Amino acid sequence: MKVDMPIELFLEKIESRFLVFPLSRHAARLAAELSPTFPGDPFDRIIAGTALAENLPLITVDQNIRVSRVVKTIW
């Protein structure tokens, strides 16, 4: 994805439309404890760990995450 504006402005726009969670120690631990069969991408693991820590469903079209059934997914 190409962003046609300064990154700070882009991030401000994102944060104005969504709730952005900081990476908590609890979410990081949950991400690290995910099964080896869960997708290995570190960002996917952090996102899933955060969803688990916050007890929220994850909106994703990523089939690997959806098939894992580790987190509740929408979409």
Image (cartoon, helix red, strand yellow):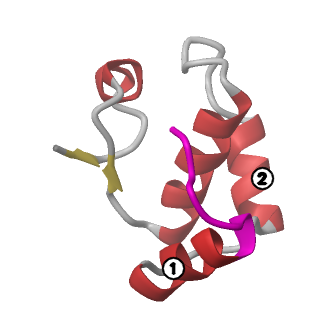
Q: Is residue 26 left or right of residue 9?
A: right
Residue 71 image offset from top left, x and y in percent: 39, 43
Residue farthest to the right?
Answer: 25
Mark identifier at residue 28: 2
Task: Return the x and y of residue 44 as percentages of the image width and height.
Answer: 58, 35
Identify the residue at the far front of this view: 4
Q: Residue at x 42, y 35 (%)?
A: 70
**Residue type, mark 1 in image:** Lys
Q: CA distance from mark 2 to mark 1?
A: 26 Å
* Residue that extends furthest to the bottom in the rendered view of this protein: 16
State the predominant SS element of the stretch in magenta: loop
* Residue at the far left in the pictured view: 75
Establish if 71 lies above or below 23.
Answer: above
Disc number for residue 13: 1
Q: Are marks 2 and 1 in contact (CB under 8 Å)?
A: no
Q: Eyeballing the image, is 18 above or below 47? A: below
Name the amino acid type tagged 2: Ala
Residue at 75 percent across and 65 percent down: it is 23
- Residue shown at 70%/67% (left/top)? 6
* Magenta stretch, residue numbers: 1-8
Magenta stretch holds residue 62: no
Label 2 neighbour load within 10 Å: few <14, some 14-19, many 20+? some
> Where residue 18 sits: x, y (%)?
43, 78
Compare residues 69 and 43 and report the one nearer the observer.
Answer: 43
